[in-house]
């Protein structure tokens, strides 16, 4: 019938029934004692690239971005490092980032097939429907490893790099206990993926389940939003402005204005330290409190996330007005289109074989594509050349018996030619066509958000994240929405999230109101009402007629929740003589849930409370208070036996049920 059998029948009736429909909201319930950390380190764990930044709590106005990395690619600024990881044939951690990629690349092909190389693996957390601690990731050579191990290795690598850099700066060893860690995740991730990230961080030794406050899981667009509030006029590019921005006249096209802005940034960037003034930037003075909204569009490698915020003055707290939406429309979509193009020219059978037999050369080819991808612009007229690795040309000849050049002539792909220097020559139109499906999806999704009734009075649209550096995306967003709001890009757009995450770690209270992504409730027994309750839910116990499997709602999906807010309900054991009660907590993406047996309802927590130890035979019914407290990405549930003050506590768990 359903995934969950009726709790009352299966558990020897430890059932509960509501005492009274009490909805007590109490926002300042036992505020956790603030721990003192010397430094906040934020890690932006991206699909394509990752990095960290930090700030000492004594001088919160200075944000330091991590040291430059060895390695790096032509045409790609390497303040961040690629999210790639290499394990030895014995499955031990070997290296991360450029180092992993270059080492893997230099291995002899016969040897490299035994090594485990992973890239762009973060998307797996978004795409896996039933994520658990056992979910696997597949390496480039086809072997499988537990995702939790890979994520923990990656986080451990960042932990060690950051502690080493801090120790070098301080001239003494820096302890992990002195650091508050912040890890960013996409807001559209489902709860299991957010919890998975926390588990991986525990495994990496950043914090412990006993001391969860040491680690904050921040949502990427929220972090960006926090940073954008602080922007001063000279730190952004306003695509819609007709007045000079950053001292460049608007006759410069978007593209050139950008290169100059980047130069300007680069000159100031030798220090790697950013000053953030403790004010709200000038641009906000144009926002009217309570009515004006702004949208943050965070477009990265894997996902695009959108949140609609409103600012509450004077302290500038943020309030989320519309639950985060988005999807897998990151710049990876462009890589995927390029791969489809190669399949069209050289045959899917060849490309599949080449990826397996020459994984390092395939990585090389995608690196070459990446730097050309970054050179695509709306007004570009000269072709883009992509170098084909020698082993591609060589392997193709072996595989097909004719040359790459022949394949290009024979394929009817118009805009891609073969150049005598051994390169694929793509016309700008061919390159722009690779961007089109992804950019169209982003624009479409944004128009859907703009059409929502909650989303009126949008003054600004902030475009952030690595993909926001693309002039093609900038132009598409500006031409679609420039008439409805001002489209603004922070100068250092790829680092916006990182810097915002540091600010969040320094002052987690800045986000005041969120929208709950799910409906939460507990399973209870209610008195059976003829005609209202379905007959198959009837349960008769000691002459009392109960309706089983009732979903008693704590909070609905998309309801506003203040951070730290506690929702309380009172229950009583269904049978006065019960010695134990079991409270099962359920979640659903649907708003209206009546029974825990409905489809889409998932169990995500259990509270077991022992009721022995007091005389329960008194005239009053035993009161069991149940509280749910909504924290950053964690939700805690507590049950208290009022008569004895005994209590049990549980964190909502989406991975182990």
Image (tube, rainbow, N blue to C red):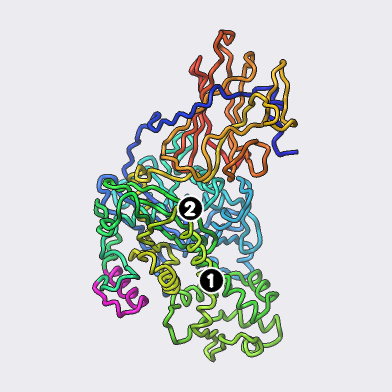
Residue for badge 2 = 324
Quadrant location of the C terminus in the rendered image: top right
Q: Is residue 456 magenta?
A: no
Query: Residue visible at 44% across and 74% down?
Result: 472
Q: Nearer the viewer, residue 598 or 577?
A: 598
The residue lying at 41 percent from left, 69 percent from top is 469
Indicate left or right for 53 with 157 as reference.
left
Q: Main secondary structure of the magenta part?
A: helix
Q: Residue at x 40, y 62 (%)?
A: 464
Q: Which residues are magenta?
A: 247-267
* Numbered mark located on residue 326 in the image: none
Residue under label 1: 334
With respect to residue 460, does 502 lie above or below? Answer: above
Instruction: Classify residue 352 by image quadrant.
Output: bottom right
Element type at mark 2: strand
Q: In the image, 406: left or right of 226? A: right
Q: Position of residue 487 (x, y in %)?
A: 37, 66
Q: Would you say residue 258 sits in the magenta stretch?
A: yes
Q: CA distance from mark 1 to mark 2?
A: 23 Å
């Amino acid at each position: 019938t359903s995934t969950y059998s009726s709790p009352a029948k299966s558990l020897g009736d430890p059932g509960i029934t509501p005492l009274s429909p009490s909805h007590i909201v109490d926002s300042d319930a036992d505020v956790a004692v603030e721990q003192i950390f010397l430094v906040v380190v934020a890690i932006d764990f991206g699909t394509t690239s990752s990095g960290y930044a930090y700030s000492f709590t004594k001088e919160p106005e200075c944000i330091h971005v991590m040291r430059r990395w060895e390695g790096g690619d032509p045409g790609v600024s390497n303040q961040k490092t690629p999210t790639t990881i290499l394990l030895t044939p014995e499955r031990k951690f070997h290296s991360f980032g450029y180092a992993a990629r270059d080492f893997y690349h230099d291995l002899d092909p016969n040897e490299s097939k035994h090594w485990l190389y992973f890239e762009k693996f973060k998307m797996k957390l978004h795409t896996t429907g039933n994520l658990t601690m056992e979910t696997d990731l597949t390496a480039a050579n086809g072997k499988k490893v537990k995702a939790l191990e890979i994520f923990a290795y990656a986080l451990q690598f960042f932990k060690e790099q950051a502690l080493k850099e801090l120790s070098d700066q301080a001239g003494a060893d820096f302890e992990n206990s002195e650091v508050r860690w912040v890890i960013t995740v996409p807001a559209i991730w489902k709860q299991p993926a957010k919890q998975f990230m926390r588990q991986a961080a525990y495994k990496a030794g950043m914090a412990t389940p006993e001391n969860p406050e040491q680690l904050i899981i921040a949502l990427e667009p929220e972090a960006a939003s926090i940073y954008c509030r602080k922007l001063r006029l000279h730190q952004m590019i306003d695509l819609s402005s007709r007045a000079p921005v950053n001292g460049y006249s608007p006759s410069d096209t978007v593209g050139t204005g950008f290169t100059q802005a980047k130069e300007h940034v680069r000159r100031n960037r030798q220090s790697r330290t950013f000053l953030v003034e403790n004010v709200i930037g000038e641009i906000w003075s144009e926002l009217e409190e309570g009515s004006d909204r702004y949208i943050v569009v965070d477009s990265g490698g894997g996902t695009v996330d959108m949140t609609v915020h409103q600012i509450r003055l004077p302290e500038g707290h943020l309030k989320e007005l519309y639950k985060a939406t988005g999807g897998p429309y990151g710049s990876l979509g462009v890589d995927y289109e390029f791969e489809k193009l190669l399949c069209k020219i050289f045959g899917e059978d060849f490309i599949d074989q080449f990826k397996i037999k020459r994984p390092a050369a395939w990585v090389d080819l995608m690196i070459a594509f990446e730097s050309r991808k970054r050179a695509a612009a709306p007004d570009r007229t000269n072709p883009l050349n992509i170098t084909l690795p020698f082993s591609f040309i060589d392997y193709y000849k072996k595989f097909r018996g004719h040359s790459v050049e022949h394949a290009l002539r024979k394929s009817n792909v118009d805009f891609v030619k073969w150049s005598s220097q051994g390169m694929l020559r793509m016309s700008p139109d061919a390159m722009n066509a690779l961007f089109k499906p992804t950019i169209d999806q982003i624009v479409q999704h944004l128009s859907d958000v703009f059409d929502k009734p909650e989303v009126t009075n949008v003054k600004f649209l902030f475009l952030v994240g690595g993909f926001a550096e693309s002039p093609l995306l900038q132009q598409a967003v500006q031409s679609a929405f420039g008439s409805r709001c001002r489209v603004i890009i922070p100068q250092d757009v790829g680092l916006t999230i990182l810097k915002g995450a540091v600010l969040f770690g320094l002052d987690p209270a800045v986000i005041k109101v969120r929208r709950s992504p799910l409906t939460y409730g507990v399973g209870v027994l209610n008195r059976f009402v003829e005609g209202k309750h379905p007959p198959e839910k009837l349960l008769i116990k000691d002459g009392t007629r109960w309706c089983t499997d009732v979903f008693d709602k704590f909070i609905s999906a998309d309801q506003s929740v203040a951070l730290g807010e506690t929702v309380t309900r009172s229950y009583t054991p269904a049978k006065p003589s019960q010695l134990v009660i079991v409270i099962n907590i359920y979640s659903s993406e649907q708003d209206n849930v009546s029974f825990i047996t409905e489809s889409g309802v998932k169990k995500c927590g259990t509270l077991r409370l022992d009721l022995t130890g007091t005389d329960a035979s008194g005239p009053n019914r035993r009161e069991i208070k149940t509280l749910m407290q909504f924290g950053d990405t964690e939700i805690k549930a507590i049950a208290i036996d009022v008569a004895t003050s005994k209590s049990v506590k549980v964190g909502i768990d989406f991975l182990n049920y």
